[in-house]
Image: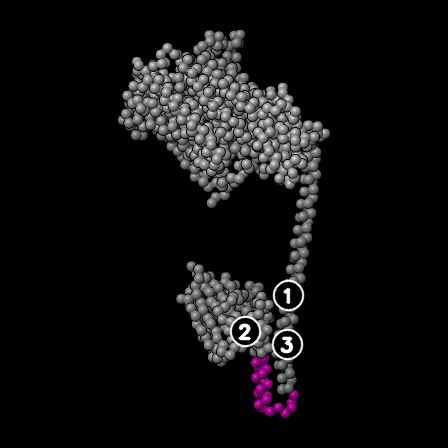
Amino acid sequence: MLSADFVIATAVGYVCLLFVLAYFGDRRARANKKSFLHSPWVYTLSISVYCTSWTFYGAVGNAARSGLEFLTIYLGPTLVFVGWWFLLRRLVRISHNQRLTSVADLLSSRFGKSNRLAVLVTCIAVIGIAPYIALQLKAVTSSIQAVAGSSEFGQGSLAGIDDVGLAFGIAAGMALFTILFGTRHVDAKEQHHGVVAAIAFEAVVKLTALVAVGIFVVYVGGGFEAIFSRAAEMGVSTPTANSFDDRWLTTLALSVAAIVCLPRQFQVTVVENSDENHLRTAGWAFPAYMLLMSLFILPIAMFGLTSMPAGSNPDMFALTLPISQGQDALALFAFIGGFSSATSMIILESIALSIMVSNHIIMPLVLRYSAVGPSGDGQGVSRLLLVARRFSIVLILSLGFFYFFFTRDSNALAPIGLISFTAIAQFFPVVLAALFWRDASLKAATAAIAAGFVVWVWCSFLPSFESVSPQVSLLLREGPWGIGWLRPQALFGLEGLDPLTHAAVWSLTINVATLTIVSLFTTQSALERIQATLFVDVFRQGSAPQGNFVRGSATANDLFFVAERVLGERRAAAIFETAARESGVDPDMLEPSSEFIGKLERELAGSIGAASAHVMLSKVVSGSDVSLEEVMQMAEENQQVIEYSQQLEKTSAELRSTAQKLEDANAQLRELDSQKDEFLSQVSHEVRTPMTSIRSFSEILLDPGDIDEGQKQHFVSTIHQESLRLTKLLDEILDLSALERGERTWDNVPIDAEAALDRALRVCDGMLRQRGMRVELGERAPATMVEGDADRLCQVFINLVSNAVKYNDAEAPVLRVTSSVKSGNYVVDIADNGPGIPKAERKLIFEKFARGQHGAVEQSGAGLGLAISRQIVARMSGSLDLVPGPLPGACFRVRLDVMP
Amino acid sequence: MADRRKLEAGMAVLTIFGALLLLPPLVYVFNQPISHLGVPQIVIYLFAVWLLLIIATALLTRALPREDSSAAEDD
């Protein structure tokens, strides 16, 4: 049998364990940046602080009372994380750039570093969260009582203590615990690795506990089917039919807003994020965590409704079911799971809220009423901040306790949480506008949040005291001073709606309307415009440094005094030394530039919030002759001049490129023209030589002199030879020009390239024998099909072989022919051991009329052979190249695509 | 690999359709008094959509380019 004393002792022991975890987690994370504490999994688990005792106990109760509605609380956040790329990634990036510390800091920073807005947001958050903290206190109190009430001896030392006393004890213990481990030091980036480690651990504990209870229930109940059908028989079937009404939509929307704007969620998701890439894991892993959490809620609720005595509190089923089955160990585990979910929420929420209170309310007050300027007292601001935070934690938990105290008679958990959600949802429209709408102004944001909050107080917060205050219940029925259309749950005569939907619809509608309308009618200040650009265009720019200060009379010394107070001496000194090193001067001689002041401001903002940091530095950096507005105007004028000159530059660049193109075209034409001239002169030259000899011989023959028959015969055969050569030359010229112009076409058909090569070698056989050339046949490809014309291909090979014969002056001439198929290419190499082709001529040999220098004298060809060959091969989609060969002479390579 | 703009569009579509599938009127399609293996059909439907969203997000995220980690912070 569990007794209350034993359970409380276990809880205290568990808290001690958390403390140890946080302590060592902190040391480990500090010592080692690559520790697993910086992993995306710990990050994801820490986000699971979203699942509080509302989930652990309240969801079961909610499922038992109103069916599937409990799911919306997890489906909303699922949607936000599924779309992490659009909202969360942007928030995290902005937070890294601006060193944001809270949702209040986000809004204040975006809307011109306004401290008033930060104060408003902080106050609303503190008031709005009070019901949520009360929910946790209530859940822990009820769970201890559920255990204690289960046996007559269970009361132990709790005998005589009512739930208020118990809740007070819990609240006090929690405050002490949070102070001890959340406010040990002020971190420059407000990251609490130790706490996050403890939260991640708690996330595992609560998940395991709930799943264990779920599996146990399914086992005892005889499986899902048995549980559901038994529930259906007893008439407590899931009330699903009417689940998807306006409440479904409302709770879904509220939970979307809550996962982004709840102070503790903003803290773990955005502020504690150490690497943007962690969102990649959290994007699916956190929804998966929530799915696991919700998997057994419905069976537990169904089984509880059918097996527990009527009138038992469905919120406590996760605990009372194991107790009623006599499973003390499991019950204790479930208690620890519920306790985990409550403690993690209270710890983180109060840390997040205390940062807001100290940064946005206490610090500005201190700054205003004490001279923490360069001439201030020697006390460090860090110490003051810590004291402020401890005080805030006590305040926050007290508010939670008071709310619990006043509303302790209402019994369900989930509705209390939804009151908080509605309050926090008032930030959501403004947060969205801050991130996506450039024109949202400070006045609009302030008015929108304030208006939404007032409606929330009237429609949601006030009615929650109905059961304890007769005045409130009268107000609900009659309206103030009997004005019916001001009734909190039927505002402007909107009756018949569910109270939650009513409150959410009115508060958010008025909120959004105010935000948009006031934005359209107000203008932004200069600082607002700067910040709006930094937020809305966060992915468009690099990390543009912002210097919101014009360098005035500030000296490095003054700035150092300020920095030292807030950041501590070591950190301040490090910043100044880095800056000095970067600008290459002695630290004492550092001249603070506006970039440096901007950087310093961001560093300070990390500790005390954007608005306070701005005020603090403004005190130091004063005496500037130019105001920010003037600078903005100057910058805008500059911008216009720059844009104008950029346009001019663009136009002139366009002109330049057009001129260049014309020049190129001209050069090309001239080149073509000169090529044509050259070609003509070469043709004339080539034609002239045989023509001259034909003419002179024919003249001799015509001369009726005494020429003997033998000579006559010789002359005639010379004329014949020369005219043959002439015809061949003209044929080649015609062939080449037809090929070049694409007139001579042939159909590429599948042919056997190896056969063409063999044929060419047979044709050249006589020529080779005549020269006494030895033919080495190397590796040969098998019969290979390529697309082309067999005769033309043969012509190419003959040309190459005859070139090799013609130009070879070696004593023992050798011709080497190899062919192969390599990766889809048919390759023929024709190499010889002749003189080769000098480097200078290698580029030219494929040109028309370009003959190699060697042997040119006695050669008869016109130098068109290679040019023609190359054209032919190109027509077959192949290539003809000169490659380094196996023999000392030249080596030509023909490459053709093998047919697939 | 699909290009980044298309992946971003994919994430947007996933988010929007995920929301539509969970809201009236589309949920009504599966909100029938039928049970599969004893579990009401609507419960199975909601958890299936949920699981689908998780898997699709994991797959899409894998294809998306990582951020440069150095962008995180300098100190």
Q: Say which residue appears at 53% left-offset and 76% top-offset.
A: A808
Which contiguous range is marked in magenta? A702-723
Q: Are marks 3 and 2 in contact (CB under 8 Å)?
A: no
Q: Badge 1 is on which residue?
A: A675
**Quadrant of residue A716 within the rendered picture:** bottom right
Instruction: Say which residue label 2 marks.
Output: A835
Question: Colour mode?
Answer: one colour
Between A60 and A238, the residue placed more toward the observer is A60
Mark 3 sits on what residue? A688
Q: SS for tag 3?
A: helix
- The amino acid type of the residue labelled 1 equals Gln
Q: Is residue A519 above or below residue A652?
A: above
Q: First in sequence: mark 3 or mark 2?
A: 3
Q: Quadrant of residue A556?
A: top right
- Looking at the image, tell me whether mark 1 or mark 2 is earlier in sequence order: 1
- Give the x, y percent position of residue A520: 61, 26
Q: Nearer the viewer, residue A206 or A408?
A: A206
Neighbor class of circle 2 (other Cα within 10 Å; few <14, some 14-19, many 20+) is: some
